[in-house]
Amino acid sequence: MRTSSLPVLFLAVVPASALADKSASSTTTPAALDVKSSAFGNNEAIPAEFTCEGSEVSPPLSWSKVPAATKSIAILAEDPDAPKGTFTHWLVTGIPASTMSLDRGGALPQGAIAQSNDKGNAGYAGPCPPSGRHHYQFRVYALDTKLPMAITRGEFLRTIKGHILATGQLVGTYQKQAR
């Protein structure tokens, strides 16, 4: 009788241990990247030159603490305060893992691709809130994978699940000037 209960006990233990291993890896919190801009600080106003009221060029960004296993960097800049839901201002994928910054309005490094923003253009769309002060989240992701050449925001968010080694965010605010 002992021999017949051993296989049942083994079958009961293996699935539980496999499930425990899977849940532990899926709840791993990504490391933190340190994201900064020389143009504005976290939760500070974005200068007009980076908005629709200025030259609408992308702000300088830098990041540090990129894990060694990183295969690519991605940037997603969004306005969660937009009246019709989150508005994507900038999505850049394929940034080489060795890149630690982007210059003000600068050219993207070789291999990086500016995806379509919610204006329907590839590249950066500066803040241009219809009313009030909005918050603009510039998120940088260190990924353990390289992404497809063309990707939408939705595809991007689905594809990076389980591939984020580290992430960091810089938030800027902007309100149109009274005229």
Image (cartoon, helix red, strand yellow):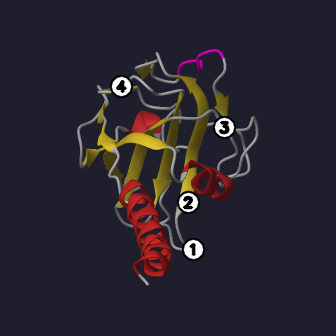
Q: Main secondary structure of the magenta part?
A: loop
Residue type beneath disc 1: Lys
Q: Are marks 4 and 1 in contact (CB under 8 Å)?
A: no
Q: Residues within 10 Å of mark 4 (few under 14, many from 20)?
A: some
Give the Cα distance between marks 4 and 1. 30 Å
Q: Amino acid at mark 3?
A: Leu
N-terminal of the two: label 4 or label 3? 4
Residue holding disc 3: 147
In the foreground, 4 or 43 = 4
Residue that mark 1 sits on: 84
Residue 133 at x, y percent in the picture: 34, 61
Please tell me in which quadrant of the rendered image residue 9 appears: bottom left
Residue of label 2: 87
- Residue type, numbered disc 4: Ser
Q: Mark 4 vs mark 1: give the one in front.
A: 4
Choose the circle earlier in sequence order: 4 or 1: 4
Residue 145: x and y in percent read 58, 35
Which of disc 1 and disc 3 is earlier in sequence? 1
Circle 2: element type: strand
Which numbered disc covers residue 62? 4
Quadrant assignment for the C terminus: bottom left
Give the distance between the C-alpha atoms of the residues marked 2 and 3, in whole angstroms. 21 Å
Amino acid type at image mark 2:
Phe
Chain part drawn in magenta: 106-110
Alpha carbons under labels 2 and 1: distance apart: 8 Å
Residue at 37% from the left image edge and 66% from the top image edge: 132
Q: Do tag 2 and tag 1 residues touch (Cβ < 8 Å)?
A: yes
Q: Quadrant of the N terminus?
A: bottom left
- Residue 169's image quarter? top left
Q: Position of residue 111 (x, y in %)?
A: 67, 20
